[in-house]
Image (tube, rainbow, N blue to C red):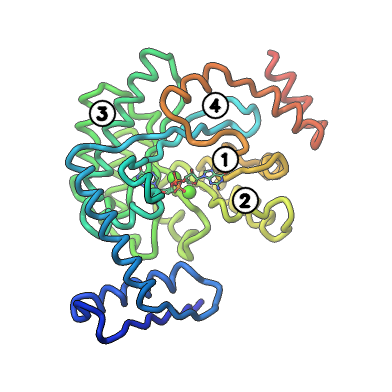
Amino acid sequence: FRLSLATGVLPLDTPKFEEIWHRCIDEMLNNAKDHSDGESRIVYGEELLHSLERHDVIEKRLLECCESDNFELRFMPIFNAKTLQIDGAECLIRCPALFDIKAGPDEFIPVAEKSNLISKLDMWVISTAIKTYKELADIHQYKGTLSINISAMELYNRNFADNIRKVLERYQVPPSNIIIEITETSYVKSSKLTVQTIESIRSLGLKVSLDDFGTGYTAFNQLLHYPVDELKIDKSFIDNIAHDKADRKMVESMVNLGHSCDTLVVGEGVESLEQYHHLRKANCDLIQGYFFSQPLTYIEFIEFVRDHNPQTILDQQALLEPSTNERVVVLNHK
Ligand code: C2E
Ligand code: CA
Ligand code: CA
């Protein structure tokens, strides 16, 4: 157990005090959750009001964007860890109307979840991603996968799998190359309904991936109870993999656990050659991160796939691990 304490101080003479004090309590709860360093902190009125105001601005703009479908997708390449061939891409949402206040999905997705906009937003992403997949496959002969993030709240939505089925039928896309990524928060319990939703998604032929694996304290439990095809080791473990032996051991255990449950294992947030080297050594199947590519626009992604040459990075990596790489090079030439 870890206890974090955050205290908000709101002057009694604040305008509309009655209306906003309970919202300030929510804000403090989130604040305490965001900082799990054990330090207790105090936040004063002005700052509290500022973050409530920001929340309202984001909510208002999101509502308008949901009505006008004013969102964009970026594509982050995912690579086979051994060969560095492009295996797929993860779709990441962007909201241009929030660029000026620098609110990214980390900030606006929780707002969308709170204000019941998330279903609309998730369906926009699913339709746009599947439509894009169709174009990539038909026009650009793309053969990789496309991963789509959804809010864990969808697991409580009884119509969710059926809504996806309609989109697949509309665009006539074979489902096996579409991966649905779910981050299970501590609020979403493994229940009959949530497991059923995952099973319905898989029975459509789609793959399911458990995102941010290792961060939730129920992570290992989830893997046993949720039938998933892939798990994504959270970036926080990869960050220190090159320097921290404990994190390295943890990553190795997660890879082995995934393999023993017949799931593919992805390492995400790879920012250096050393991190890549350790993930390879740990037998990780797939990798992604800024070291290989940032999230790209559709056009940039097509160019990236066209021009991608794994050999340059494999050559650098070979200096760290000569014997294994020689084997890979031979396989590639065949
Ligand atoms: P996530 O699913 O864990 O996505 C990975 C996030 O980490 C992305 O941020 C990506 O740009 C970033 N990232 C990947 N590699 C690296 C790296 O090497 N270094 C660093 N510093 N960052 C890296 P982004 O796009 O801001 O997304 C943040 C989160 O927002 C996502 O985390 C996901 O939980 C959520 N999200 C993004 N797109 C969607 C979406 O379409 N629908 C839903 N429901 N949630 C989404
Ligand atoms: Ca993800
Ligand atoms: Ca993640």
Mark whose residue sits in front, 1 or 3: 1
CA neighbours of label 3 inside 10 A, class few (<14), some (14 to 19), many (20+): many
Cα–Cα span, label 1 and label 2: 10 Å
Q: Which residue is mark 4?
A: 86
Cα–Cα span, label 1 and label 3: 29 Å
Q: Is mark 2 within 8 Å of ligand 1?
A: no
- x, y (%) of residue 128? 29, 31
Which numbered disc, 2 or 4, marks the residue that appears first in the sequence?
A: 4
CA neighbours of label 4 inside 10 A, class few (<14), some (14 to 19), many (20+): many
| Label 4 with label 1: CB-CB less than 8 Å | no
Instruction: Tell me the kind of residue under disc 1.
Output: Gly
Which image quarter is the C terminus in? top right
Cα–Cα span, label 2 and label 3: 34 Å
Q: Is mark 1 within 8 Å of ligand 1?
A: yes
Mark 3: which secondary structure? Answer: helix
Q: Nearer the viewer, residue 21 or 316?
A: 21
Instruction: Tell me the kind of residue under disc 2.
Output: Ile
Asked whether, in this view, residue 260 is left or right of residue 246, the answer is: left
- Which residue lies at the image location 25% right of the left edge and 85% below the top edge? 13
Mark 4: which secondary structure? Answer: strand
Q: Which residue is mark 3?
A: 168
Which numbered disc, 1 or 3, marks the residue that appears first in the sequence?
A: 3
Q: Which residue is mark 2?
A: 238
Residue 240 position (above or below residue 306) = below
- Which residue lies at the image location 65% right of the left edge and 41% below the top edge? 283
Cα–Cα span, label 4 and label 3: 23 Å
Q: Nearer the viewer, residue 53 or 180?
A: 53
Which numbered disc, 2 or 3, marks the residue that appears first in the sequence?
A: 3
Q: Which residue is mark 1?
A: 289
